[in-house]
Image (tube, rainbow, N blue to C red):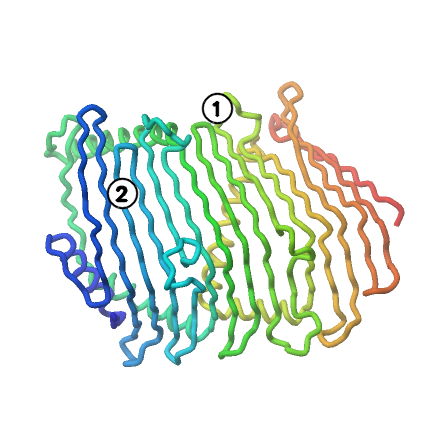
Amino acid sequence: NILLFDRQVYLLRQIAATVLGGSDRAADSQGAQVEAQGSSLKGDAEAASFMMNSRVLFQGATLMLHTSESPYPIATCSVRDVNTQFSVTGKGTDVVLQIASLEMMDGKGRTFASSMGNTSSADAEQQLVVLKHRTVAPDSKDHPGYDSSWDLDFRSLVLNWNDKTIALLVEFGEEALRNKEGGEAAPNTSQHVVNSEGKPVSSSREGDKAGAEVANKSAENAVALKAKLKMQVTASIQLLSAVLMRDGDGVAKLEMSALTCKYELGAHGSKTTGKLGNFVVEDLSRPDTLFQEKLGLRDTSRSVVEFELSTYSASGAEHPGYDSMLVLEMSSTRLVYMKRFVDELRAYIAAEPLISGIMGKTASAVAESAKKAAGHHRRGQGLAKVRCKLVNPLVVLPVEDSSEEHLVADLGEILLENRFSTEGEKRIEHFEVGVKAMNLQEGGKSYLMEAVDLQLTGNRLLVSDGASRKPLDVELQISDL
């Protein structure tokens, strides 16, 4: 059990660094069981291989967070059964981290976060989090095709996102950060720089030159290593659910399930594939509403999104003429649009400090990246080939929450794709947006609009000679309306 005040965060970190760095003695704590399964070193003169295994098991720990102004904890976090395993052989290394369960409660004893892991089971499928990391020697006989791999398996976690608790946690973090910044001593500006021969240098000019030399060599080594490194990362989340709460009352429930993702990095590019089982948004602010589920799959046996993103190295022999390609397919989903609910959700996010801060920074980063990408695109750089397919998204427009009267807009099958061509010195992008069988219907009754098709095609020059403007040609075709 750890009682932690925000003013002690920096001091505790300094003590931990001193103890771990300056002492070779192992300290046993009451809440932790350190189980060393033994370390064995087996030498083989012919194969020059060795093996070492170690295991550490923490049965449980409880962390209580306090502010300097209140003797009562603002939050309590409990972690159970943390299991770490580490092994080294001549073929590589393996690291496994398992956490059975996690529970976090606010100062009033209300559950803020809870997992669905089974603390009594050692089965990996019953753990909250299982993280595996492997490195493979390049000359290994059974090389799997990658030099490094990460595997994250995240089971189920339920969050009760209370705005008051989040505000207190943000305040705790900000005060701890201020204490850390105020308690840190000024860094030592003297630096010991060595030249390429490993000898110390004396003058600042010589030090700058040696520092630049070391930095350039490190950058070259990093580039060479990245060109050779092959890495694989897999991740999965079984269930992540969050109930947004205001003063203890539910506003909305967000639930994501069956998310899987795989990332592969090679010498000439990368490939990322993944799918999301479902993403559901429920309205908890109005118990009398007839449309509680505001967003979700129409056919739950399918995945809501499947995607594949590939990137290509410009220096690669297999470069297809563009730097990345995105293929995305979205299954039929239903969106119930109620202005009242949208305004309430927007107001909650704006008033909640953590979500609004994250979304603000994310929006700024996305806008900046889009701006740079647009500039590169206009110059014919960073070209991306896209093929996106949306299968019959359904938009429901109720008259009011307690009324069964509503309009249903079936947006049909939407396909967006582009391609690139070269005519002489001109680089041209061709794009196409198609919508098939779009309908508008009064709920359960007659059609207001039926089987409407749209076809938008166009092309544009990506790079011009500067004297003439870049033309954009667009053609729109509409079926009988």
Label 1 crowding class (10 Å Cα cut-off): few <14, some 14-19, many 20+?
Answer: few
Q: Name which residue lies at 62% across and 20% down.
A: 425
Residue at 21% x, 34% y: name it.
50
Q: Amino acid at mark 1?
A: Gly
Residue 210 visible somewhere in the drawing: yes
Q: Nearer the viewer, residue 278 or 452?
A: 278
Q: Which mark is residue 87?
A: 2
Residue 412, above or below 426: below
Q: Nearer the viewer, residue 337 or 431?
A: 337
x then y, percent, for residue 434: 75, 42
> Which quarter of the image is occupied by the N terminus?
bottom left
User: Can you tell which quarter of the image residue 117 is in?
Assistant: bottom left
Marks 2 and 1, the one that precedes in the sequence: 2
Q: Contact, CB < 8 Å: mark 2 with mark 1?
A: no
Occupied quadrant, residue 90: top left
Q: Amino acid at mark 2?
A: Ser
Q: Residues within 10 Å of mark 2 (few under 14, many from 20)?
A: some
User: Which of the 4 image quarters holds residue 81?
Assistant: bottom left
Residue linked to disc 1: 316
Where does the image place residue 78, in percent across and percent down from the top left?
34, 68
